[in-house]
């Protein structure tokens, strides 16, 4: 079986332009004898469903596009689309071959219903499993799907993984073929005994950036083919379902470089964001801080120095002012694109920052350039709050400050543009309980570790303290994060490079409850009751505890309450479709995400 991946960059919803390119690529693939051409998950529809009011028209145009592709495609193709069921995004793939369209996910579901002896629905969402070109073909859309192909022992020779995950620093596997040595896919190939065909897009969809690096991996773990990162490519590879290895000419997997991949994602994301906003230029305030220095370097790499305008704000601090002047020279920003603002006479530091933002807004309006901000995730999470901002794009807003420091060092290995003095002040948030740590870098890494543990990995404060200690500091960091939610400034478009942005991690405003560090005994009693409930035990394992007046054990009360709350919570037994396979929240399915309002359940009309 000869399979090809069309690693491409598209505009979501550009049905006419994308279908034309798909037809052209299919002609190239047909000339190479390809049996199946795979397109990336977001190529046609992107990664975010359209609003409800637009859904009817969108689906009509999508259907027309697919029917047109039946006539235009020169070889069999797997074309992903994005559908929606009960308000939940549902990825699907259309196998277009021999003049017909087969929705692979729906077909698997209908086959399971037909085999269920009249039951209303299968117990779980079945995955595709079909004969094609002499091989058993499976299609996975999420990491959970890959897990299911192993755990439920599907009989497949090839699994096509249509990645809908943009690059995230906290998800190694999102880098696709560039991170094979550290990601999950080697384990998937070994566990399933199938070829893994990983297809990824290139470029920005919504605020996420796809890095390309599509690949074909043999069942025994050898790399058969890989496309480059951040470049379009037509990757062609022969897949022998009966082979047992080794490959005659395997590729050597590259060493994963997370900062370099992050830099590539940010530069691509920034260029795409400016283009989306109708400009090929950017402007920013350069004030001698490390953040503004890094954004200036990022902008020149993404757009070119002749398309960057710098507003150099001098504060009277010789060290900071010197950093700004050396930076614009090192980045080769033309002199006629550098403006200066003297703030040395302004005694109020916050007022000086506001003045600089006002001048930046005027510069953007006058030149048509996109105004950039230099706020990072750590600063936005823990303050101080600076509501006045002219930024339409904040490239670092989803990047922790310790990662900003690492990226600045990386950029200087390419060319030493950022002066050493810019690293002298890292702006570590003032948090009680960190005074004994030896350096600013160590303190900053601890702060960011706590934030990422709480936001991306959703660890309770009890677990964070158990792993990292420093209870006072952990509670202060999480407490400030939540306290600033009502007044936190929106930084403009943030290029997503983690699995959950600050906006996605926002909890209910005005919530008076806050978690606290709990003793192991308290947590274990609840966990035992929850375990008993999950396996349907009549009597949970009991621990000593207070009893109610009627003598019923306290733990039984806990179990009953957990069952009641579970069934009435989102995703519980009384929701329209019950728990969804693969739910775990977060954009990459392994962390928590933004919950839907509970009133969108079955009792909304009551």
Image (cartoon, helix red, strand yellow):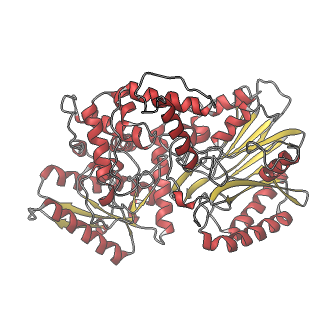
Identify the residue shown where x is 36% and y is 75%: 367
Q: Is residue 318 left or right of residue 226?
A: left
Identify the residue shown where x is 50% and y is 40%: 561
The image position of residue 583, as x and y in percent, is 60, 45
The image position of residue 149, as x and y in percent, is 73, 35
Q: Is residue 140 left or right of residue 563?
A: right
Identify the residue shown where x is 31% and y is 34%: 446
Locate residue 185: give its quadrant: top right
Up-down relation of residue 457 to residue 24 (above or below): above
> Residue placed farthest to the front in the image?
550
Identify which residue, 272 or 138, lies in the foreground: 138
Res 37 visible:
yes
Identify which residue, 350 or 323, lies in the foreground: 350
The image position of residue 132, as x and y in percent, is 87, 44
Q: Is residue 151 left or right of residue 271?
A: right
Identify the residue shown where x is 46% and y is 68%: 280
Identify which residue, 48 or 570, lies in the foreground: 570
Image quarter (top left, top right, bottom left or bottom right) of the C terminus: bottom right
């Amino acid at each position: 079986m000869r399979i090809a991946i069309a690693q491409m960059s598209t505009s979501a919803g550009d049905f006419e332009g994308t279908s034309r390119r798909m037809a052209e690529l299919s002609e190239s693939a047909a000339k190479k004898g390809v049996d199946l051409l795979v397109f990336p998950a977001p190529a046609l529809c992107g990664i975010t469903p359209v609003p409800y009011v637009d859904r009817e028209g969108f689906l009509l145009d999508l259907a027309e596009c697919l029917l047109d592709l039946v006539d235009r495609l020169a070889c069999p193709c797997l074309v992903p689309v994005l559908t929606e069921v009960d308000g939940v995004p549902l990825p699907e793939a259309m196998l277009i071959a021999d003049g017909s369209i087969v929705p692979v996910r729906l077909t698997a579901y209908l086959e399971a219903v037909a085999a269920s002896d009249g039951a209303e629905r299968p117990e779980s969402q079945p995955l595709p499993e079909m004969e094609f070109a002499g091989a058993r073909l499976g299609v996975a859309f999420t990491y959970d799907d890959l897990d299911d192909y192993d755990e439920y022992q599907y009989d497949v020779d090839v699994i096509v993984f249509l990645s809908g995950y943009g690059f995230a620093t906290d998800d190694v596997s999102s880098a696709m073929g560039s991170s094979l040595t550290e990601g999950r896919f080697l384990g998937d190939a070994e566990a399933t005994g199938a070829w893994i065909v990983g297809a990824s897009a290139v470029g920005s969809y919504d605020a996420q950036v796809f890095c390309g690096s599509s690949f074909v991996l043999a069942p025994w773990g050898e790399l058969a083919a890989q496309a480059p990162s951040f470049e379009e490519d037509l990757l062609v590879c022969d897949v022998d379902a009966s082979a047992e290895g080794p490959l005659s000419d395997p590729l050597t997997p590259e060493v994963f470089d997370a900062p370099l991949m992050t830099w590539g994602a940010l530069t691509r994301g920034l260029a795409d964001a400016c283009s989306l906003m109708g400009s090929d230029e950017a402007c920013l305030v350069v004030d001698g801080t490390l953040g503004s220095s890094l954004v200036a370097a990022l902008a020149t790499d993404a757009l070119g120095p002749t398309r960057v305008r710098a507003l150099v704000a001098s504060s009277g601090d010789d060290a900071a002012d010197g950093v700004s002047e050396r930076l614009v020279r090192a980045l080769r920003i033309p002199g006629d694109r550098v403006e200066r603002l003297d703030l040395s006479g302004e005694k109020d530091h916050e007022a000086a920052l506001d003045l600089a933002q006002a001048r930046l807004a005027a510069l953007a309006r006058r030149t048509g350039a996109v105004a950039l901000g230099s706020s990072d995730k750590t600063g936005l999470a823990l303050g101080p709050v600076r509501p006045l901002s002219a930024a339409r794009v904040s490239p670092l807003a989803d990047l922790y400050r310790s990662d900003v420091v690492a990226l600045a060092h990386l950029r200087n290995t390419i060319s030493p543009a950022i002066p050493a003095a810019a690293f002298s002040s890292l702006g570590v948030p003032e948090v009680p309980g960190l005074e004994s740590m030896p350096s600013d870098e160590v303190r900053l890494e601890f702060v960011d570790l706590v934030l990422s543990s709480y936001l991306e990995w959703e660890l309770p404060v009890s677990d964070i303290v158990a792993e990292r200690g420093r209870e006072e500091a952990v509670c202060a960091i999480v407490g400030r994060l939540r306290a600033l939610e009502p007044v936190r400034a929106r930084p403009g478009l943030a290029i997503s490079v983690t699995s959950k942005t600050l906006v996605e991690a926002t909890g209910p405003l005005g919530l008076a409850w806050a978690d606290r560090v709990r003793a192991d005994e308290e947590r274990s009693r609840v966990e035992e009751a929850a375990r008993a409930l999950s396996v349907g035990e009549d009597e949970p394992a009991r621990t000593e505890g207070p009893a109610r007046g009627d003598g019923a054990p306290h733990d039984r009360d806990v179990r009953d309450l957990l069952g009641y709350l579970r069934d009435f919570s989102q995703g519980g037994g009384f929701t329209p479709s019950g728990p969804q396979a693969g739910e775990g929240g977060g954009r990459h399915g392994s962390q928590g995400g933004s919950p839907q309002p509970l009133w969108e359940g079955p009792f909304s009309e009551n």
